Image (tube, rainbow, N blue to C red):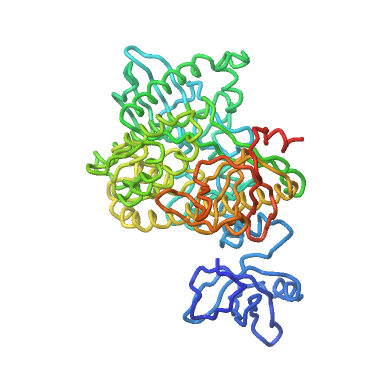
Amino acid sequence: MKDDKKHFDAENISVGDVLIGRVHGGKKKKFRVKILNTNLTIPIQRKFGDNKQLLMWRDGKTDVVVKILSTKNLYGEIIGTLDSSKISEIILRHGVIEKFSDKVKQAAAKIETAPSEEEMARRIDRRNLKIVTIDGEDAKDLDDGVFAEKIDGGYFLGVYIADVSHYVQKNTVLDKEAFERGTSIYPIGRVVPMLPVELSNGICSLNPGVNRLAMACEMNLDSSGKVTNYKIFPTVIKVFRRLSYTQVNKFLDGEISELADCAENLNTLHAIYKLRKKIRDERGAIDFELPEIEIVLGKKETPLKIYKKFRGVAECIIEECMLAANETVAEHTFKNQIPSLYRVHENPTSEKVEIFNRLLNRFSLHIPTSREITPAQFQKVLEKVKNLPAEKIISTFALRTMQQARYSPKNLGHFGLAAQFYTHFTSPIRRYPDLIVHRMLKAKPDEIPRLARRLEEIALQSSERERRAVEIERDVLDYKSVEFMKNFMWQKFDAVISGVTEFGFFVELENGVEGLVHVSTLGGDYYNYIEDEFALIGRRTGKSFTIGDPVRVRLVRASRSKRQLDFELVEGVTAENLLAAFED
C-alpha cells in the first residue's frame, strides 16, 4: 500500500494501489475521495444504488479505503471503511474485501446443498470406506479425508479431496471470484475465504456422515512405502469421523482409547507416515522444524497469550499423506502430458548460499558451492545443529536462503522437498491452483487446449495472491504481538540475537516475538558492523554482538502503528522462563 503520509500525485500511483481518504462531493458534484495527508483526490466509480451510502460516508469523519482502477483517466472504487477492528483495517489496506458481492452470494445460494443421485451414480462409490478427516479443532473448511489399510505386500493409502471443481465451473461468477481472491487468508482470529461459506463450509467441506463429491488419489505402497500403483478419479464418499489433531496425537500417545473404531486406520496411517518420511529423508528433503507463533485473542480481538506451536505426529501424518498425493498427481500429469499447474521451488542462488556460508563458518560448517547445490547438503547442516543452541538461528537463516516457491505450468521440480514432480492437489477449497489441477484432470480432450491457454496467467496471479495473503497474516501477527507486548513495558527478558545490521541488532524472545536494539542505545563505544561476521564490534573495547548470542534486554517502546518493538540492552543474562512470566 502507498504511504499516505507522504506527498504524491497521480504520476506515482499505480492500478491496484490502496489509499485511505474521506468522501467529498455529491448533489451536483461528482463524488471524490480526498486522500489523507495529501493534495490528491480520486474520482469514484459509482454503481447503481451507491448514492445513499456515499452520502452517509460524506460526514467528514469516516475514513474510506479506495482501490485505484485506472491511472489513465484517474478513478477508483471504495472497497470499504476503516472500522474499530485493526485486523479488518490491515486486510483492507492490502486491497482485500472480506465480504462477497451480492452477485457472488446469489450464485452461491443457487448451489445444491447435497450431491444429486444422478451425479453420485456416475462416480466410483467409496462410501464403504471408513474415511476420516484430521484437522484443527476450529477448522470448518475440511478439504481432505484419508483412509489406509494393510494389503498383501504393503499398504493401501486413499487420499480424498473435496471436488470443488464440480461446483465451481469455469468462467462462472464463482470461478471468477475464486481466481480474483486466489487463496483463503488466515489472519489471527478469522478466515477470509476464497469461496462463500455455502461452499467452503457447506457442500464442498468433507463433513462427517453426509454424502460428498471428491477427487480420489488411491495409492498402493510396497513394504518400504514406495508408490507402486495408483488411480486418480472422481468419487463419492461419506466421512466416517471428523477427528482433531489433538485427539489423534493423544490416541497415538496412548492417552485415550475413544478412537477404537478408527484404530486400524490411524495405526496404519502412522506406519505409512514413518515409511514415507524415511523415503524423503533418504532423498535429501529439507525438514525445517520451525515452530509457528500463535496468539490467543479474547473479546474485541485483544491478545491474551503468545506461544510457540510445534507440530505433533498427527499433523505430520496428514502432511505426509498430502505430499504423497501431490507428488503422485504431479507425476501423473507430467508423464501423461496433461497441461497443469505445478508447485515449483527452484535452487537457491549461489550468492545467497555464500551469505549463508559466512554464518555457517562461525560454527565450522559449510555447504560446498563448487558443484551443484543439493537439498541434502542443507539437510545435513540442519541435522548437525539439531538440539544445539544455534539450531533456531541456522534453521531460520537456511529458510531465508531458499527461493520463494511459486506456481508454474512448467514442471521445474521442488528443491526443498527434493521432489522431481510436485503440485498442489489437496486444498481446492482454499487454493485456486488446486481447483485448476482438478479441472485439468477431469477435462475432456477437446477442452484441454482452451483451458491450457490460461495456465500461465493463473500461475502468476495465484503466486501473487499467495504472497499478499502471507503479508496480511504477517502484518496482523506483528500488530497483535506489539499490542500484547505493550503490557510488559520496561520489563526485562532473556533473548537471542537473531539478526545484525549496521543500525543495531534484532533479538528474539522465548515466545518468538522479535524487536530491535538500536546501535545508538548501546553506548560506551562506537560499533562497526562487520558483515562477514554478522557482528557489531566496538572500536575501542572490541566488545561484540553477534548473531546467536544470548542477551538480556528491556522493552522500552512498542509502536503499534509501525508494528515495531524497541529494546535496550541490560547487563547480565538469566535463565528465567519467559513464557511462564507472560502467563502470570
In which quadrant of the rendered view does residue 199 lie?
top right
Q: In this view, does 237 lie to the left or right of 492?
A: left
- Is residue 122 visible in the rendered image? The answer is no
In which quadrant of the rendered view does residue 326 lie?
top left
Indicate the quadrant containing the C terminus: top left, top right, bottom left or bottom right: top right
- Is residue 12 visible in the rendered image? The answer is yes
Q: Residue at position x 59%, y 54% from top?
A: 475
Query: Which of the pair 218/579 is nearer the observer?
Result: 579
Query: Which of the pair 144/246 is nearer the observer?
Result: 246
Q: Residue at position x 30%, y 42% from top?
A: 413
Q: Residue at position x 43%, y 29% from top?
A: 321
- From this view, report whether residue 180 is shown above or below residue 395: below
| Spot occupied by residue 391 in the image (x, y as percentages of width and height) | 47, 35
Q: In this view, does 476 lie to the left or right of 181?
A: right
Indicate the quadrant containing the N terminus: top left, top right, bottom left or bottom right: bottom right
| Spot occupied by residue 498 in the image (x, y as percentages of width and height) | 52, 45
| Spot occupied by residue 539 in the image (x, y as percentages of width and height) | 50, 56
- From this view, report whether residue 269 is shown above or below residue 358: above
Query: Which of the pair 364/188 is nearer the observer?
Result: 364
Residue sitting at the far left = 371
Q: In this view, does 324 lie to the left or right of 50?
A: left
How many badges with numbers are in the image?
A: 0
Residue sitting at the far bottom = 28
| Spot occupied by residue 80 in the image (x, y as percentages of width and height) | 65, 65
Q: Residue at position x 66%, y 54% from top?
A: 87
Residue sitting at the far front = 540
Q: Is residue 264 left or right of residue 191?
A: left
